[in-house]
Amino acid sequence: MRPVRRPGLVATDLDGTLVRDDGSVSPYTAEVLARVEAAGIPVVFVTGRPLRWTEEVFEHVGSHGIAIVSNGALVWDVARHRPRLERPIEPELGVSVCELLRAAVPGTSFAVERVDGIGLEPEFRERYGIPEGSRRGPVAELFDRPALKLLARHEQLAPQEFWDVAEEAVGGRLVITWSSTTALLEISAPGVTKASTLALVCAELGVDAADVVAFGDMPNDLPMLAWAGTSYAMANAHPTVLEAAGRIAPANDEDGVARVLVGLLDR
């Protein structure tokens, strides 16, 4: 395995990766992120979280001022508090995919994510709190305009089983991934992944893929880990990620990202 050179950019997932299981960024990790930024190395957060769940870590975003959220569907300008790039699902395509998926897997329910919040079908059970006033209704009504991400949930299937059936049913019309321990699929517009949006951001910043060091822990991180010149799976990562990544970082609760970055700063 070749030595890891000093990175031109660091791309890191949040949950299960940079963020501890209690939802916090440790003081040590925050200190290391500041050191990396001071060394002139951008650290870009690349998360499946919607915007409303990402804002709590924006204090750690460096001077480049951007974050990639919703699995690459949105690049957010943190300083100006506005979208820098949106890569949404068009309504007609989104509704047709919902019909295909529900026909293949009866009992599937849907929710639709946008910059301004979430809309949910009445039977969609959200495991976390949702904003007051969020819309409830059939998915065809929720898709009255483009959406950043479509969520599909099933209460009986296992995550991998649900993904396998959905991939076959949808046939590549949209990008399907997952990052949950429950059967919750995260569906994006054609070609939209963490990797493809990170590539756009890196091109804008003048950073080659070979100079990117990426960290992740779940299947939605796989495209990014494959694209980056150097990839680390967290020790707590999903087995498919551990198998695919080039290297293993200590677990998220052990400040794994920060511990790797400290070693890279000295190169």
Image: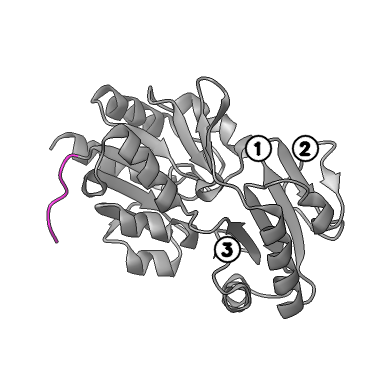
Q: Quadrant of the C terminus?
A: top left
Mark found first going from the N terminus, 3 or 2: 2
Number of numbered discs present? 3
* Relative depth, front residue between 65 and 182: 65
Q: Which residue is mark 1?
A: 115
Q: Which one is nearer the viewer's eye here, 160 or 31?
A: 160
Query: Residue tagged by mark 2?
Result: 131
In the picture, measured across the screen, residue 247 lies left or right of residue 3, that is right
Left or right, residue 69 beside residue 8: right
Q: Would residue 12 be visible to someone looking at this image?
A: no
Label 3 sits on a secondary structure element that is loop
Viewer-side label of 1, 3: 3
Residue at figure coordinates x 35%, y 56% from the top left = 225
For discs 3 and 2, the disc positioned in front in the rendered view: 3
Indicate the amino acid at tag 3. Leu
Residue type at numbered disc 2: Pro
Q: Where residue 107 appears, x then y in whole percent?
A: 80, 73
How many other residues sit within 10 Å of disc 2, few (<14), some (14-19) or many (≥20)?
few
Q: Does residue 166 lie above or below 231 as drawn?
A: below
